[in-house]
Amino acid sequence: MNKTRKMKIRKTICAAVLLMATLTVARPIVAYAADNPLKLTIRQIFDAAAAPAQGDTFTYRFKSLDAGSPMPAGSTADIYTFTIAGTADKVIGPIGYTRPGVYRYELRQVSEQKPGYIYDERAYTIAAYVDSSLRVEIIVTNADGTKAQSIAFRNIYGVLPSDPALMADPPVRKTVSGNPKNNGIFTFKLAARDASNPMPAGSAEGVKMVRITGQGEENFGTWSYGKAGTYYYDISEVNAGEAGYTYDKTIYTITDTVVDENGRLVLSRVITNAQNKQVTTLAFINQYNEGKDGPKTGDEMNKTLYIALFAAGGALAVGAVIFLIASRRRKGGKAA
C-alpha cells in the first residue's frame, strides 16, 4: 500500500473518531435508569382541636443546597415552592439527572404565623446519589443527622387562650363612713356561678376571698380562658357581724363573653350592679355607728337574757313586798 493511500485511510479514521466524539458530547442523555427522574412524596398530617378560622393550607420550600442542581419544573433560583391542604400527600418532581454525582436539597415548611396554628418546624435534608448508570438512590435525614424513613409534617390548629394581661381587673373599693376607733377587717367574695369556670390564683371550688383593713382597695386577680363562651361571676361583701358596722349588701355581676377571633380567644367584660346598670368600680360602703351593738349570739345572748329575767324577777319581788306592807297598814287602820 502506497503512502498516499495510507494517509487517506488515516484521515478518514481521524475524521470518523472526531465526528463520534462531537456527537457524544453534544447529544444529551435522555435514557434514564431506574428511579431517574426522581419523584418525592411529602405527607402532611393536619390535627385540629376545633374548626380553623382560616384555611388549613400550608406552604413548603424545596431548596437546592448546591447551585445548579436539577430541580422540579416551576422552580425559581434553585427553590421550588408548593402547598398542601389538610391531611394529604403531595408528590413533587420529576427531577431528571443527566450526570453522576451527589445532589443535596433541603425541605422545610414556611411558617406564615397564622393565629391558632402550630407549625411543624422540622427540616429534612435529601441527598440524591446518581451513579455512572444514572441510577438514583436517595437518603433522607432529620436535622440531627438521623435517617428518616419518610418525609412527613404534622400541623396543629388549636385556639390560643385569652391573654390575662388584657383582662379588666377593677379593684374592690371599700369606704367606711363614721369614726371607728379601730379599723375593721372586711372580707369580699368572688364566686363563679359555675364552679368549673376559670378562676384567679388562690381560688378554691370557684370562690376567692380578699380582705381589706379599714378603707382601701384590693384586686381579685386575672385569669385566662381556653374555650369560647359566656361566663358569670358574683362579687359581694361577707357580713362578719362586727360590732357597730352596717354592711353593704350590694352584689355585682361580672359577665365575660369570650369569642374566637382568628385563632385567639378574645374577652369582652361587662360589670353590672343589682339594678343591672353597668358600672366601672366595685364600690362597697360600710356605716359605723358608735355605741351601736352588733348582733349577739351564743353565751352573750344567754347572759343578757338571764340579766333581764333577774331584773324582772327583782322588780316583781319588790312590788309584792310593797303590796303586802300596804295591805297590812290598811288592815291596821280599820282595826283602830
Image (cartoon, helix red, strand yellow):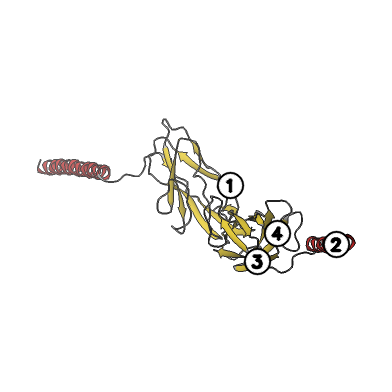
In the rendering, which numbered label is found on residue 123? none
Residue drawn 45% across and 53% down?
Answer: 191
Residue drawn 69% across and 68% down?
Answer: 32
Q: Please tell me how crowded label 2 is: few (under 14), some (14-19), or many (20+) other residues with Cα within 10 Å.
A: few
Task: Give the vertical position of 7 relative to 239 (above or below).
Answer: below
Q: Please tell me how crowded label 1 is: few (under 14), some (14-19), or many (20+) other residues with Cα within 10 Å.
A: some
Q: What residue would you read off at disc 2?
A: 6
Q: How many marks?
A: 4
The kind of residue tagged 3 is Lys
Is disc 3 placed on a helix, strand or loop? strand
Give coordinates of residue 279: x percent, y percent: 59, 49
The kind of residue tagged 4 is Arg
Work out whether residue 265 can be spotted. Answer: no
Give coordinates of residue 7: x percent, y percent: 87, 60
Relative horizontal placement of residue 226, taking residue 18 as reference (left or right)? left
**Which of the two discs, 4 and 3, labels the residue nearer the N terminus?**
3
Q: What residue would you read off at disc 3?
A: 39
Q: Nearer the viewer, residue 293 or 35?
A: 35
In the rendering, which numbered label is found on residue 168? 1
**Label 2 to label 4, Cα distance in Å?**
39 Å
Q: Nearer the viewer, mark 2 or mark 4?
A: 2
Q: Nearer the viewer, mark 1 or mark 3?
A: 3
Q: Quadrant of residue 75?
A: bottom right
